[in-house]
Image: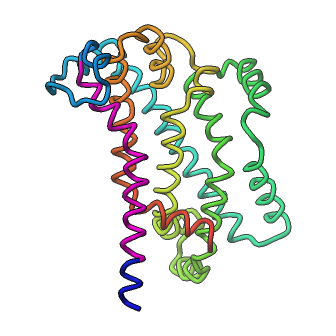
Amino acid sequence: MKTKRKNKKIALIAVGVVFSALWFYPFFLIVINSFKTKAEIFQNTLSLPKGLGLENYTMALDKLDFVRSAANSLLITVGSLVLIIFVSSMAAYALSRNTSKLSGIIYFIIAIGLLIPFQGIMIPLISLFGKVSMLNRPGLMIMYLGLATSMATFMYYGALRGIPKSLDEAAIIDGANTFQIYWKIIFPLLKPTTVTIIVLNSLWFWNDYLLPSLSVNKQGMFTIPLKMFYFFGEFNKQWHLALAALVIVILPIIILFIILQKHVVKGISDGAVK
């Protein structure tokens, strides 16, 4: 029996390794080819580079205007995350602690937002923000807030159902007001869910092309995906530079995911299962 279980475990590990290798292989090709010259890439795409010079990367950083475009992406991503986390967590806290018909209706309306595709509201959304002169970085943050609040509130609400109300009652006895209870007691307990929301939405905001192309498609406000679009258009035949730029753009979000990945599974299970 033990041998059978051991063999099954080994087989599952082997399958996992194979699928991981298949998933990682395209990224491996991007990395090794980013160190090659243009001639080396066309000679043999699958071979290892002859050297590990950083000329491609330094040139790509310069042509990509990486500092400015990364700063724009970082500003939009961080600003949107701050708005989403605090608005959604406070809304979920209020809805979970006030169990009335009205709160149930409001939560149902918020949950319905998960079913509405962005493409269905894209044209009226951009038209409305254009009329009030909000097709800029603050306007884009507000758009992300509206689009991401439903999922974040849903996850926070599920996590809050696992936190007993007795904590609130004990804090009230100690003289804490509602905001102090939320900020000092409840919000720290929501850390796994908060980290999950940060990771999922960071992947979306950092890599999003469609919404920034409609709202901040102006010189000086380009985000990383927008700059990459124009970069590939300009350097579509210089693959050594294009691949180096691609690695530079991908690395920040991979590093973020590696740092925070241990909280992601717990956050999803807290938000969806409880």
**Picture coordinates of residue 135 (x, y %)?**
64, 20
26 or 272, which is in the foreground? Answer: 26
Count of number-bearing discs:
0
Judging from the image, the colouring scheme is: rainbow
Q: In this view, does 186 lie above or below 235?
A: below
What residue is shown at x 32% (from left), y 38% (from top)? 28
261 or 146, which is in the foreground? Answer: 261
**Picture coordinates of residue 96 (x, y %)?**
69, 69
- Give the main secondary structure of the magenta stretch: helix
The answer to whether residue 197 is left or right of residue 158 is: left
Outermost residue, bottom side: 1
Quadrant position of residue 18:
bottom left
Q: Is residue 29 magenta?
A: yes
Outermost residue, top side: 234
In which quadrant is the N terminus drawn? Answer: bottom left
Q: Does the magenta stretch include residue 35?
A: yes
In which quadrant is the C terminus drawn? Answer: bottom right
**Picture coordinates of residue 37 (x, y %)?**
24, 16
Span highlighted in magenta in the image: 8-36
The answer to whether residue 225 is left or right of residue 99 is: left
150 or 168, which is in the foreground? Answer: 150
Q: Is residue 114 above or below residue 160?
A: above
The answer to whether residue 33 is left or right of residue 114 is: left
